[in-house]
Image (tube, rainbow, N blue to C red):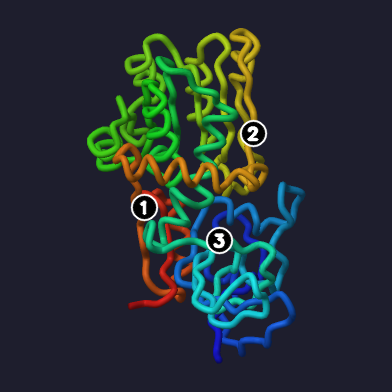
Amino acid sequence: MKNKQFLLKTRPVGTPTRDNWDYVETEVPELADKQVLVKVAFISLDPAMRGWMNDGKSYIEPVQIGAVMRASTVGQILKSNDPKFQVGDYVYGHCGVQQYAVVDTQGLHKIDPSLAPLERYLGVLGMPGMTAYFGLLETGLPKAGETVVVSGAAGAVGTVVGQIAKIKGCKVVGIAGGADKCRYLVDELGFDGAIDYKSENVKKSLKALCPKGVDVFFDNVGGEILDDVLTQIRMKARIVICGAISQYNNTTPVKGPSNYLTLLVNRARMEGIVVFDNVANYPKAAAEMAGWIKEGKLKAKEHVVKGIERFPETLLMLFKGENMGKLVLKVDAE
């Protein structure tokens, strides 16, 4: 059986290109004990993948040169050497950017395709949803009546952060790029306001939309937007550092916050989050979010691109702001 794979060829400098990967077709290996063969259906495309390509110290080991590009996936088991997993089971795991994966079962989780579309387990019910849930509720600690601002608000994490904040009784303002995204946040997802950073002065718009200041800022972007929001924080504000997509492809040093002394003045705190710290509580979070979806309180949107061969170009959509909702690659082109 032939397997289509993308292997990391070189570490990118700045924005990745197709040349940073080798596209290969190889034979699928035989299974060892406690391994399964998964036919990958959907691949999650996330900003974190850019960091995984760097050879530096981080919260997770970098992808090695010559290895299959790391990615979260959902798929179906075709063969099994583990009695806990049966042929036909659908699973979530890190199977990588490939058509078929022979993997240990230790990192796999069974999922139920009758409860939600498969691709939703890579979005609201997957790593982005978990990031939003734990990052906002356990680190941001929003209280009813507070003002929550989220950057990258139209992306996979930001859309969920804003909706959960609304469920918890907060005023929510999103920062996104483009009028269509801003309309989507307000008209479809129920945000109280949205700022188009491409056409508006973020600092002025924040003052207008958040006249009492910002209690919680959930940051996916970093750079100038982080600096702008820091000027508007309230006493005891919480700034959640989830990511900094504006900085990931820099060839110069990362631009850190120059307004960080507002943390001192306002006795505020800034804390980073990594979703993998909460693995043990994923089922609880997924159950609660599935309940919100069923009640119509939490909406999910996936941006699906078809064809594994389109992986490099599709990944770059994240850094160009071309996706609306969770960006997912469907392995089969049909």
The secondary structure type at the circle numbered 3 is: loop
What residue is pinned by disc 3?
A: 72
The location of residue 317, given as percent across then percent down, is 42, 56
- What amino acid is found at the position of numbered circle 3 in the picture? Ser
> Mark 3 or mark 1, which is nearer the start of the sequence?
3
Q: Is residue 204 left or right of residue 42?
A: left
What residue is pinned by disc 2?
A: 272
The secondary structure type at the circle numbered 1 is: loop
* Image height of 314 relative to 170, above or below: below
- What amino acid is found at the position of numbered circle 1 in the picture? Glu
The secondary structure type at the circle numbered 2 is: strand
Q: Nearer the viewer, residue 270 or 75?
A: 75
Taking the spot 52% from the left edge, 31% from the top edge, the residue there is 136
What residue is pinned by disc 1?
A: 322
Asked which quadrant contains residue 294, the reply is: top left
Asked which quadrant contains residue 159, the reply is: top left
Q: Nearer the viewer, residue 74 or 271?
A: 74
